Amino acid sequence: MGLMRFLVPPPSQISETAARQVYISGTDQIPWRSDIRRQGDQLIIQRSVSDSGNVHVPWEVEGFGELVLSTGTLMERDAAYLLPVELARGKVNQVRNQLADWQTIGLLVSDDVKARLHVAIEHFALAATTQHEPAAAVTHSQAAIRAAVEAGDRLVSCYVEQALEVRHRQTPRLPTWLAANIGHTKLDATAADRFLAAFNTAVLPLVWRDIEAEEGRYDWDFYDASAQWCSQQGCRVIGGPLVRLDDRGLPDWLCLWEGDFDNLVSCVKDYVETAVNRYRGQVSLWQSAARVNTGKVLALSEEEKLRLAVSSIEITRGADPDTPAIIRFDQPWAEYMSHEELDLSPLHFADALVRADLGLAGIGLEINMGYHPRGSWLRDRLDMNRLLDLWSCLGLPLLLSVTFPTSGAADSLAWGQCAAVADGPAGGWTPASQRAFVEHYAPLMLSKPAVQAVIWNQYRDADRHEFPYGGLIEADGSPKPALAALTELRRRHLE
């Protein structure tokens, strides 16, 4: 059995909750199933293989908050690694490699980036050579990590500025869709006006559970009115996800067919065909299915979820062959795989569907940043860039659905067990940190030609929702600062 040991001085640097999120992946960035435990000042990782890998750890970085950091590729050995040194090594190498890659394609890098990276390298060199004095090594490691994260962030800023400039020379107004999920209750006049100022596209979720609460009895009233409103406003519509494999996406009566896959597919076919035929011509893009990689409903196996995803795409395409259809995956970093015996990562799942030549028009990625479970821990922009580049290798457009919390408090209107992680960005989960997320991460998304749409998952906190305080409108109807940032983003860059 594979075993790695890490010294964590001081042990309080990693909370018990954060320690449970540690995982190890191979060079393909796919996590291995592993067991994590604390033993004094050591973090111990056990798994069934002994291959070298990268360890990913939530780590407090001064000025940035708790970010998931990654070591370089480590082999198994008898002696314990000093974790801060290895995280510093990993971050410094990540920045250096990305800098080299972007300079190869002509990126002009500011002196500030080079200066911060030089500081990081100097501190890392001192950390690596003073490991016999752990206190000194930790001090230099923390300084190296902070400088490397700063250098990486400024490097991404250089890339975004120049990439957007290139895109704007080709197309003065970018064709990227900026959208939000309008929820399941009617927007008042003020909320509607704010929506139209910020977004050029609306998501009608078409939640099967709400539409067909009783088998065979459909209630389309809200979605009919919403589709009509979008048409009157000249607003594009994304429909779905039609089949969302979680406990709030599927109707309760479907449990009658648990274990009877053929009848389950028949029910899916009836609903998807009915929905697509009803809104055909009003919808610009269909989300055929979502959470097919993580959903834990009806005791479906991985093979059955894959077959169900294929069926949902085929049914959608059959009913409306002229409108593009996509499928959406959540938790794209696949951290959850470290705790479960699974064969297919979300990337492998998507690759199998692409290779099946189903006429898939794109891939959706659901990035609920800062939530647990059903979300992703906070990552810096360099990690986000790496994720987008990796998924772009599939050769299909990407549609990104994002959420970011404004509070870590309990949310009475949120269903399920999902909550903001305890330690988040510097300054905590606030409306200001949500705006900062939009201002820093959304331009990176727009800079990628592969990204066709950026979608905010929840528009209003007053609606029943999954992710606490993830909306852009407070429960009392007042706008959060992030909405103004999105409005400005559209004004500057989009149609």
Image (tube, rainbow, N blue to C red):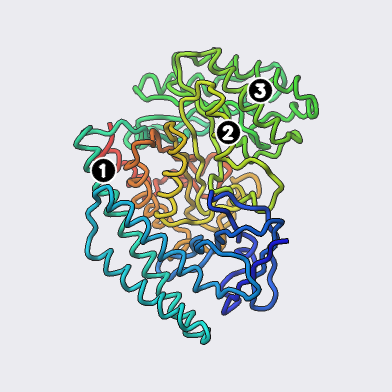
Nearer to the camera, 234 or 421 = 421
Nearer to us of marks 1 and 3 is 1
* Residue placed under numbered mark 3 in the picture: 212
Relative height, residue 342 to residue 453 (above, below): below
Q: CA distance from mark 1 to mark 2?
A: 30 Å
319 vs 159: above or below = above
Q: Residues within 10 Å of mark 3 (few under 14, many from 20)?
A: some
**Viewer-nearest of discs 2 and 3:** 2
Q: In percent of the image, x 36 and y 72: which residue is there?
A: 121
In terms of secondary structure, where does tag 2 sit? strand
At 45% from the left and 69% from the top, the residue drawn is: 88
Residue at the outermost left position: 169
- Please tell me whether mark 1 or mark 2 is closer to you in this view: 1
The one of 270 and 427 positioned closer to us in this rendering: 270
Check whether the beta carbons of the residues at disc 1 and disc 3 lie within 8 A of each other.
no
Left or right? Give the position of 90 relative to 208.
left
Residue 26 drawn at (x, y percent): 57, 53
Q: Disc 1 marks which amino acid?
A: Leu
Circle number at residue 180: none
Looking at the image, is mark 1 or mark 3 earlier in the sequence?
1
Distance of label 1 from label 3 (alpha carbons): 44 Å
Q: Position of residue 127 (x, y in %)?
A: 45, 79
Per the image, the residue denoted by label 2 is: 290
List the residue tagged with mark 1.
Answer: 164
Q: In this rendering, does residue 459 appear at all?
A: no
Look at the picture and state if 62 lies above or below 300: below
The amino acid beneath tag 3 is Glu
Which is nearer the N-term, disc 2 or disc 3? 3
